[in-house]
Amino acid sequence: MSDTPARPGRPSVRKLPQLPSAVRGLAPASALRLSRPSDTWFKPALSVVVASAVPHLTLLAVGRLDLIVYTMAGSLCALYGHGLPYARRARAVAGVVLGMAAGLAVSLVTASLTGSTAVLIAVGALLAAVQKVLCDATRIGPPGHVIFTFVSSAALFAPQRLGQIPGHLALTLGAGAFAWLVALAPALVRREGPERRAVARALEAAAVCAADPGPRNRDAADPGPRHRNAAAAAVHAAWQCLLASGRPTPVRRSLERLVVHAEAAFVAPGPATGAAHPERLRAWAAMTRGRGPVPTPPPAPGTTDELYGIDAERAVLRAREGRRAARRALLRRLGPGSPLLPVAVRTLIGCALAGYLCAALGVGRPYWAIVTAASLYQANITLSWNRTLQRTLGNLLGVLVFAAVLPVSRISPLALVCCCLFFGFAAEALITRNYWLGSVAVTPMALLVLEFGGAHPAGELIGDRVLDTVLGAATGFLAAALVTNRRATGRVEQALDATDRARAAAERTVADPAAAPTERDRTRRALTASLVELREAGDTAAGEWWQRALPEQRLLAAERAGHRTLAATAPRRGPAAHAPSIGAE
């Protein structure tokens, strides 16, 4: 269900026309290795259970469990937005609900107008490609487009009449509205919760960087770049979360001061003393993540000016021109030159091939193959290969779990509802450890949904799901290999140019004694954002194949120069030299 954020790999060989070494020599064990669970795994798990339980039990009470597929489409919207501050989450989840209803409407109308399998598969593949591009462009986050594709593809192959569609869409919108309330309910208890978690992650990443900053001699081997990159990404995410959180509150002011210290610790790593000491940063992170008061650090030099700059930037973002700039950025990500276009073509071709192949072999539910293929497409082919292994293993193990639990689910309708709720929770609890482990729970839940419309032969369900999984994974990855993303290198070159411009602007403000402190802070944050984008673009391109050689030396040089420029801003606003005490607000 929810997905772990994909982190592109960094293979060492990128020469045309060979596959990167990470793809050619990929060990399955690395793709299937379990990781630590997310620190917020329980939030989507509990949210989807609560958002699903009320509609499920209501339909059970009125004896219409056959309608659960429509309410489930709305309930699954509760999986989204858990990393966003509540002000932005309200808009994001509302958009998810409307997008879910729109995709479902297209599917239901198509299913009511035609019974042609060929047409249904084509529409399903097209919807999957559109949903993939929109989710990537808007950066909605996990679980991404897979839930949309699951709902719209399943609805395509469900019997439907035009007169039923308004009622079915009303059920989806009603369940979606309840899911929206569930997603926002924690704000009543802890309205700055997402901001606190984002700032805690920034402090923890800064602590790692402060503990291992690398040698001060720039010519020596430096083991610390990955720590600085991770700290830059975490600090940037924290600033973005605070900017999107709405009007400042005393708690948010303390969080902003903490981010100033985290930023100072990574932009100019040096002796681990005072506020930059790793243990001090970790202590602040633990208190920030906890339920008690936010620690109130002493102001670092320049903090007042920086917070004034944050307020000015927040005002710009909330102004009409700021909203227009955000829309223009979204349109650029969707434009003709977008690097997302090849991924959309992969999705379209892979889903169509999977669906048509399964239909040709007589599989009664080709939408399973469409969903399997759609779920494979990640940022690059390396990650898509990993997802292929994970999806295949998880689904095959999941059908065994389904076979074991099916007799229990058929004891009564209530038992069936409880089984679906259990596997919904289990999927979210397990999927952040590895996608294949979550798929073991997702598969039986998807199969059990069919039982709401009536019992089906277990052997037929299991056989179809196994065949769909194998064919969908094979054809999906074949499409990923055939449709190359030559634009990935172009994105790196654009990111390099943007980083050079941001670094030049930051250097000008540092060298200008008359530059306003707010301008220095703005250019520094812009440089940090450009470095984060550069690293993401480089890692994505490194996992692709059949493309121009990456400007690797220029990329590394740009990162080093960017971090040196960030370090040059530290004397203007570095951390206090004395060891502060931890206060409480």
Image: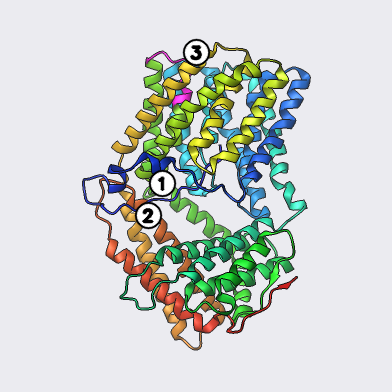
Report whether 209 appears left or right of 350: right
Identify the residue at horizontal 58%, vertical 79% (top origin).
Answer: 274
Residue sitting nearer the eye, 502 or 558 = 558
**Quarter of the image with the N terminus in it:** top right
Q: Can the viewer see residue 131?
A: no
Q: Which residues are magenta?
A: 361-369
The circle drawn on residue 539 is: 2
Query: Which percent across, then down, holds residue 572?
Result: 52, 84
Res 352 → quadrant: top left
Q: Earlier in the sequence, mark 1 or mark 3?
A: 1
The circle drawn on residue 379 is: 1
Query: Which percent across, then down, holds residue 179?
Result: 69, 39
Query: Which percent across, then down, holds residue 185?
Result: 74, 47
Q: Element under label 3?
A: helix
**Residue that badge 3 annotates:** 460
Identify the residue at horizontal 51%, vertical 16% (top origin).
Answer: 461
Identify the residue at horizontal 25%, vertical 45% (top origin).
Answer: 546
